[in-house]
Amino acid sequence: MNTPSENPVDTAIAVSKPWFVYLVRAANGSLYCGISDDPVRRFAKHQSGKGARFFLSSPAMALVYTEVCRDKSEALRQERLIKKLKKSAKECLVASAAAGLSL
């Protein structure tokens, strides 16, 4: 049985759910940046053509970068920073993520 004192804990856990900023590679080689609380599910949406208009001209091919953020606000800030980067800098993020997986 849940007591009223347990509900704030449940709420705090839900509020502290991590968010992610992610990069998806399109078939034409371009990179799409977005945020989600579940990047794998969001990538599946992009692949199905329901995630973003960006992928209408070139389908989503691979989820190539994810970065965990403490909350949605931080994820939005990080997304803005990444979107301002040149493509070469975004490719460095992708390469660093790939290198981390191969260790």
Image (cartoon, rainbow, N blue to C red):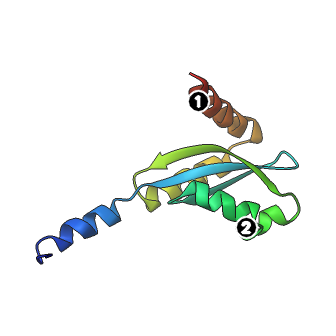
Tell which residue pokes out farthest to the front in this image.
Answer: 1
Taking the view exactly as shown, the residue that stands out farthest to the top is 103
Q: Residue at x 55, y 60 (%)?
A: 36
- What residue did someone put label 1 on? 101
Of pointers 1 and 2, the one earlier in the residue sequence: 2
Q: x, y percentage for residue 62?
A: 73, 47
In the image, taking residue 31 as reference, residue 58 lies left or right, namely right
Circle 2 crowding by C-alpha within 10 Å: few under 14, some 14–19, many from 20:
some
Image coordinates for residue 96, horizontal then vertical, percent: 62, 29
Q: Nearer the viewer, residue 5 or 89?
A: 5
* Image position, residue 17 (x, y; %): 38, 59
Q: Secondary structure at mark 1?
A: helix
Q: CA distance from mark 1 to mark 2?
A: 27 Å
Quarter in which the N terminus is drawn: bottom left
**Front residue of this view, candidates 93 and 27:** 27
Residue wearing tag 2: 52
Q: Residue at x 63, y 43 (%)?
A: 65
- In front: 85, or 67? 67
